[in-house]
Amino acid sequence: MSKIVIAFWSQTGNTESMANAIGEGVVSEGKKVEVLNISEISPEDLNDVQAFALGCPAMGVDELEECEMEPFVEKVEKISSGKTIALFGSYGWGEGQWMRDWEDRMTAAGAKVLDGEGLICQEMPDESVLEECRNLGKQLALI
Ligand SMILES: Cc1cc2nc3c(=O)[nH]c(=O)nc-3n(C[C@H](O)[C@H](O)[C@H](O)COP(=O)(O)O)c2cc1C
């Protein structure tokens, strides 16, 4: 049985909470999942994974976190053609531009972004956002 990988970067736990809820959604569909901090996975591990989720909050000036996540995503772009990718992350005071830029990048790399857009939430996800995350996980599991 193929597994779903959910890889995230998170500083204060908001994006991590989203990752865990997406993982719950995957498991609820009876599929195997690995929810991994970005430091626990290398881009090459995604070579043979057809569907996966990537999470990162808005950092810098509406950018991906630059030390770990940005280099990771640059490598993933090279292997993304034909894959389905769910994007998610938390933000603070911006308007979600970091996620729109990220969606555009992955689409340009040939990936299908699940739902057509990333799932974002302001700061800590509340129960309704966590439910959206679980639903995203269910969709990933059905691919
Ligand atoms: C250094 C730094 C830069 C940030 N830059 C932005 C930003 O450009 N736009 C924004 O909307 N939020 C920004 N934020 C807010 C975070 O995206 C927000 O607090 C988010 O919930 C953190 O997610 P995490 O708990 O997964 O780390 C920034 C936070 C920090 C610490």
Image (cartoon, helix red, strand yellow):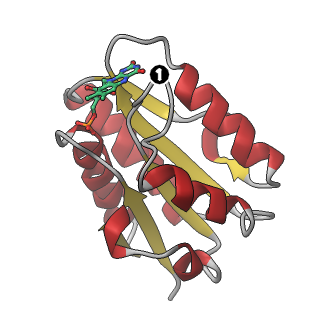
Q: Is residue 37 visible?
A: no
Residue beneath disc 1: 61
- Residue 28: x percent and y percent? 32, 63
> What residue sits 48% from the left and 11% below the top?
95
Left-right relation of 87 to 121: right
> What residue sits 20% from the left and 28% below the top?
124
> What residue sits 41% from the left and 62% below the top?
6
- Examine the rendered structure and indicate whether residue 55 appears above or below residue 29: above
Q: Regarding ligand 1, which quadrant of the image does it lie in?
A: top left
- In the figure, residue 51 lies in which quadrant? bottom right
Q: Is residue 100 visible?
A: yes
- Residue 101: x percent and y percent? 65, 30
> What residue sits 40% from the left and 37% below the top?
89
Q: Categorize mark 1 by other alpha carbons within 10 Å: few (<14), some (14-19), many (20+).
A: few
**Quadrant placement of the C terminus:** bottom right
- Examine the rendered structure and indicate whether residue 49 appears above or below residue 12: below
Tell me the kind of residue under disc 1: Val
Classify mark 1 as within 8 Å of ligand 1 or not, answering yes or no. yes
- Residue 117: x percent and y percent? 62, 33
